[in-house]
Image (cartoon, helix red, strand yellow):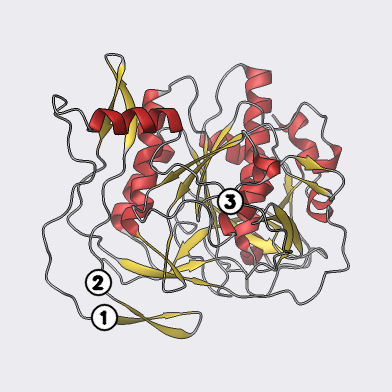
Amino acid sequence: MKKIISAVLLLCAPVLIAAQTSIRQIPRGTFNPRDQQRMLEEDKRPEEKQPPLYRQPAPAAAVQPRAVVVDTAPVYVPYAPATPAVVHPAPRQGKTVINSAPNYQQPSHHYTSVRYIRTRSDIPNVSKGWPREVLGLSSLPEYLNGSGVNIAVFDSGVSPHGNLNGKVDVMDVTGAGQPGDEFGHGTAVTGILVGGNNSERGFKSVASGARVKSYKITYKENNEHKTNNVHIENAVNSVLEYNAARPDNKIDIINISYGLSGGDERLESILKKAYDSGIVIVAAAGNNSGGLLYPAAYNFVIGVGAMSKNKQIVPYSSFGAGLDFIAPGEDIFALGNDNDYVWLDGGTSYSAAYISGIAALIIQEWRKKNGSQPSPAQIYGVLQKISSAVPSAPSQKRGNGLPDASKIMSAV
């Protein structure tokens, strides 16, 4: 049964420390700027009979706005036209051609991303590295850094940052033509995963040796960040096409730090296809103090809740059936826009990133010891082995508990 759903961006408003730098334009629509340029040049050749860059749907009848509830406030969701197809460079007889994404006539749902706002007005009196300590990351050998693992991050894009040079490729699947990360959310999530080490600023990521393929699924309109199911589906299809073209360098993990208040059959189907192909899917549980949002609630997706530095479940963290693990989600020191660093609150977005990073470490160690790629079920099994209950939280709010990454070597 189809439901009207609303997307909740699981993020507080970052407190940015101004350090003005010019933000370079990130190429849209491809992982490789050179391929993008070659593709555009081929478009101009009259003898090349390629499909149009975007397929536009037939006009649809107007639909009256409907009210949905997000964080207890009514939000009016208008009809939106279908998202343009995604552009991919793909090899065919030595040249680059354009492959279009599925030509959906219109989104089955359109929803507005609303921030869960928990603005910091101070600098917390905590260690910048406390998440690494409680997750056992500080005890890992130097080699265990996610090397060789690829992570797809479905988010608001990524802004240029010195800690991310050479580690991130960006694709905009919205068709909105807004390069970079206007929001800062995707930059923070990506930094937790692969942001490297800056000892001077006290920052260190979980899996600095991994690489991120960033799929920008949001666009900015009237100071709101919006997305729809087609954007997310396009991102999943892009991952599957990417893996089909690169069997020796596949994307291993999908991190989704977004949540929908209801399920979507088509989105569930394409995500299940990705899972069945061997991709681990990790999603934020939600920041609504209630039941899990989607896709975290799907039984094949790893749903992650948020905890504080005192190992308490944060009050707004979603819980219940489908919650698998918890990880730090408050007082997070992270990468920010303008090539700087920020303190963040507000949640399970960051918790999901920590679990995705630990999954990358498990994949690396599994390959090292067994010479093979672990299945999503095997990765989940290792996460269960290295996790322990948090006594202060009931089971429906902690799932399998908090992972201890220092146990990875013995658990694999």
Q: Is residue 300 at all visible to an observer of this figure?
A: no
Residue 272 at x, y percent in the picture:
38, 44
| Amino acid type, residue under disc 3 in the picture | Ile
Residue 112 at x, y percent in the picture:
40, 70
Marks 1 and 3 close (CB-CB < 8 Å)? no
What secondary structure is found at the residue carrying circle 3? loop
| Amino acid type, residue under disc 1 in the picture | Pro
Asked whether, in this view, residue 25 is left or right of residue 277, the answer is: right
Give the number of the mark in front: 1 or 3.
3
Q: Nearer the viewer, residue 315 or 394?
A: 315
* Pointer 1 residue: 65
* Badge number at residue 31: none
Marks 2 and 1 close (CB-CB < 8 Å)? yes
Q: Nearer the viewer, residue 254 or 25?
A: 25
| Amino acid type, residue under disc 2 in the picture | Tyr
Judged from this view, the residue extending furthest toward the top is 93
* Pointer 2 residue: 79
Q: Which residue is drawn at 78% across and 48% down?
A: 135
* Pointer 3 residue: 23
Q: Which of 367 and 12 is in front in this view?
A: 12
Q: Earlier in the sequence, mark 2 or mark 3?
A: 3
Q: What separation in Å lies between label 2 and label 1 (alpha carbons)?
A: 7 Å
